[in-house]
Amino acid sequence: MIIRESVNIGGKEITLETGRIAKQANGAVLIGIEETVLLVTAVASSSPRDVDFFPLTCDFLEKTYAGGKIPGGFFKREAKQRDDEILTCRLMDRPIRPMFTDGYRNETQLIATLLSADRINKPDVLALTGCSAALHISNIPFEGPLAGVRIGRVDGQFIAFPNMDEIAKGDMDIILAATREEIAMVEGGGKEISESDLVDALEFGHKAILPLLDLQDAMRKSLGRPKMEVVPKVKDEGLHAKVAELFGPKVDEATQIRTKQERYARIHELEQEVLGTLGEEYPDREKELLAAFGETKKKIVRRRIISKKERIDGRALTDVRPITCEVGLLPRVHGSALFTRGETQSIVAATLGVTSDEQRRDGLYDAEEWKKFMLHYNFPPYSVGETKFLRGPGRREIGHGALAERALEQVLPPHDEFPYTIRIVSEITESNGSSSMATVCGGCLSLMDAGVPITAPVAGIAMGLIQEGDDIAILSDILGDEDHLGDMDFKVAGTENGITSVQMDIKIQGLSREIMVQALEQARKGRLHILGRMTDTIPAPRADLSKYAPRITTFKVRPDQIRIIIGPGGKMIKGIVEQTGVDINVDDDGTVHLVSSDSVATAKAREIIEGLTKEATVGEIYEGTVARIVDFGAFVNILPNTDGLVHISELDWKRVESGEDVCKEGDTMKVKVISVESDTGKIRLSRKELIEKPEGWEERPPRERSGGDRDRGRSDRGRDRGSSSRGGSRGPRSQGDRRSGPPPRGGNRGSGNRNR
C-alpha cells in the first residue's frame, strides 16, 4: 500500500511517502520540500552481534544528477563524501543513536540519498526526519518518532525551514532535533545572538515539528510493522553488587586523582584487579565484570557531583580550569597561538592567502562558490597518549572543525575590506575535554596575532549536566570523563555580546526551559572569564600583518576595461607580472588585486594598470602622438588604447586644408580634450587652444559650403565614424570596441591563475 501525506509548516509543505520505492528495506520513505526530494532507507541485520556497543551506520549521499549536474574531475562519478555530506551524516546519527531499545545490537544502517535538489531548500533536516520516519514504520526497535527543523530569523521573526535566501538575509541558522517531550540535539550559529533569543528559537522550533511527529505516528498506525523483540541480557545483580562492595572505595579514591594519565593508570590497575580477584568465581565473564566496574565508577562520580558538588579534579561546578595563552609561538607563521586549558591544549596557526588560494566548492548547494575561510582541526593520537595509524580526517575531526569555523566566521571582516583567503589549522596536542572549544579560543588568538581585523574576540566553553531524579548539577568546562558519564554535552561559543556557534547533545528526557536558561547563563559567565584571559594576552588584533604575509592592494576599474588589462591571450597581464613580479588577479566586477610583499613593485604595477585604463577628461591636456592623418584632421593617441580626433578646424588658428599641412604620423603633439561624447565615447581634441593666437586675429563667420564641400563633409563624417588608429583600436569605449562584444567573463585573470 502506498501512503503519501503532507503537512504545512510555516507555509512550507513537507511530504512523506512510503510503500512505492525500496520495498525490500525494513523501512523506506521519500521525503521532500518543494523540489528537494530524498530517499531514506533503514535496514537491520536479522540477528544481533556479540558486541558491547550498538553497530549503527548513518550515511548521506548527494547525487549530482539531483541538480542536473555531472560530477567534476576525471572519473565522472560520485566518489568520497564531501565535508558537507559528512556533517549531514553526523546530524542524522547524533539524535537517532540514543533512541533504540536498550540491548539492541543488530547491525543497522540508515542511508539518505538526495534524488532531487532545487538548490534552495537544504536537505539535511529532511534526512534527519526521514531517518526517524523510516525507522518508525519498520520493525526495527526504534523508540521514536523524532523530527528535525531548521530555524532562521529575518527582521526579528522566526522562520521554520527557511530556504537559502532567507538564511542569507537572517541572523541565525539553527538546526533542532526533538521528540514530543524533549530536545535531542541542537546545531547551528548566529550573528552574536543572545541567550534568551536562542531559547526562544528552540521553543519555536519544538512547536513547529509537532505536525511532522503526528504524520509519522499516522503512517505507523496505517502501515507500521511489529517491532522485533529485543532480549536484553539479564543483569547479574549479585555480580554487580560484589564489584561495588569490593572495589567501590578504591574507585572513589581513584576517581579523585587530579591528573588524567595518573587517574587512568590507576583505574586500569583496578580493572585488572577486578578480573584477577573475581575471574575464577565468574569464569569467561570478563565483559560483565568490566561492565560492572564501569557502572560502579559512573555511579560514584555522579553521586559525588550531585551530593557534594565536587568534581573529579576538585573544581566547583562553575569553575573553569586554569588557562594560559601564548601568541607569536611560531616565527615564520603569519599568526600563531598556544591555548592551554587544564589538560586540553591546541597549537593553532593562521595563514593569509590570496584569491588563488580559495577553495572551490562543488556541491549542489554551493556549486561554483569559492570558500574564503577554512578551519581544519587535527586530533593526533599522541594528544591522548595513544598509538594509532595516521589517516585522513574522520567524521569527528570534520565536525569539530565545522563547529569552530562557524564560531569564528561571524567576526571576520568583509572580504572587500580585507581581501585575503584565511586558513586556520588547529593541532590538538593534549586532550581532556572540549578540544573543539580550545580550537575556537586558539583560532581567535591566531587571527589577532596575524593582524586580521576581527570585529570582536571569540571564546568557547563546553557545559555538562548530571541529573539524578530532581537533583541537577550543571558543570562548566567539562572533562572528558564528565562528558562520557554525564547527561549533556553543550558547547557554546561567542563574543562578549552574544553567541556565534552552538552544539548540544542530550542523553536524558525532559530538559526544561529553566535548565536550558541556567546552562546558557553559566556558559556566558564562563565564556566571559575565558575572553578576559585571552585579551590579557593580546587585547586587539595587531596593527600590522606579519612580514611574511602577502600584501594585497585592491582598486577598481570598469568591467569593460578588464580586457585591456588582460590583453590578447593574456599578453598584457603576463607582461606586467614579468616586469614587476607582482601577482595580479582581476575579478569580473573589475576589482583588481595586486599581491606582493614589495611595496615599490606594487606601486609600479598599479601605475601601469591605471595608465592602461585611464580615461580622457574634458579640459585635461595631454602630450600625444599622431597616430594617423586624414583629410579632415589627425587622430592623436593620448592614452594607451585611447585616440582622439583633432579636427582640421582645431589644428591651428589659421585655415588648414589637410592635417598633413600641420603634422605627420609619429609627431608629438600637445592637445586639450574639448569634449567626450557620452553615448559613443568619441574624444574631440584641440591643438589650437594651446598655441598662441596670431596678432590681429579676428573670428570670421563660417563660410557657406558648396555642394562639393557638403559631399566631402558627409564623406569625412563617414570616415570619421569608421576610422581608428593602428590595429583598429580607438579606445576602450570606441565603436570598434563595442562591436567586438562585451568584456570576457572568466578566462585568464593573471599569470598562472585559475579560470574563474
Image (cartoon, rainbow, N blue to C red):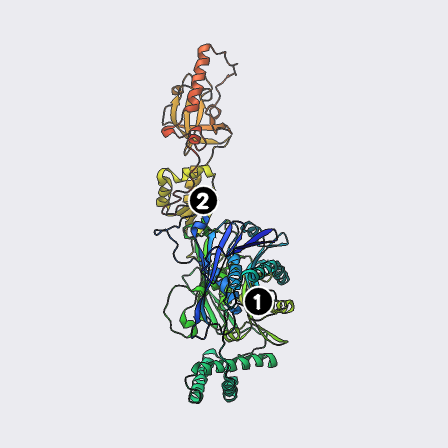
Q: Badges 1 and 2: C-beta atoms under 8 Å apart?
A: no
Q: CA distance from mark 1 to mark 2?
A: 40 Å
Residue placed farthest to the right in the image? 514
Q: Looking at the picture, which amino acid does disc 1 mark?
A: Arg
Comparing 212 with 663, the one in front is: 212
Task: Answer left or right for 522 relative to 326.
Answer: right
Front residue of this view, candidates 415 and 742? 742
Element type at mark 1: helix
Percent position (x, y) of residue 42?
Answer: 47, 62
Instruction: List x then y, in percent, for residue 135.
Output: 51, 63
Q: Which residue is mark 2?
A: 587
Q: What residue lies at 36% left-to-right and 28% top-to-bottom?
A: 666
* Callout 2 secondary element: loop
x and y percentages locating residue 515 in the rendered image: 63, 69
Q: Residues within 10 Å of mark 1 (few under 14, many from 20)?
A: many
Which mark, by number, is residue 703? none
What kind of residue is marked 2?
Asp
Task: Let me know if residue 579 appears in the view.
Answer: yes
Residue 527 is tagged as 1
Task: Say which of 747 and 614 sits in front.
Answer: 747
- Is residue 655 visible in the rendered image? The answer is no
Position above or below: 586 against 513: above
On the image, which quarter does residue 315 sit in?
bottom right
The extreme top residue here reads 706
Report x, y in % for residue 475. Answer: 58, 73
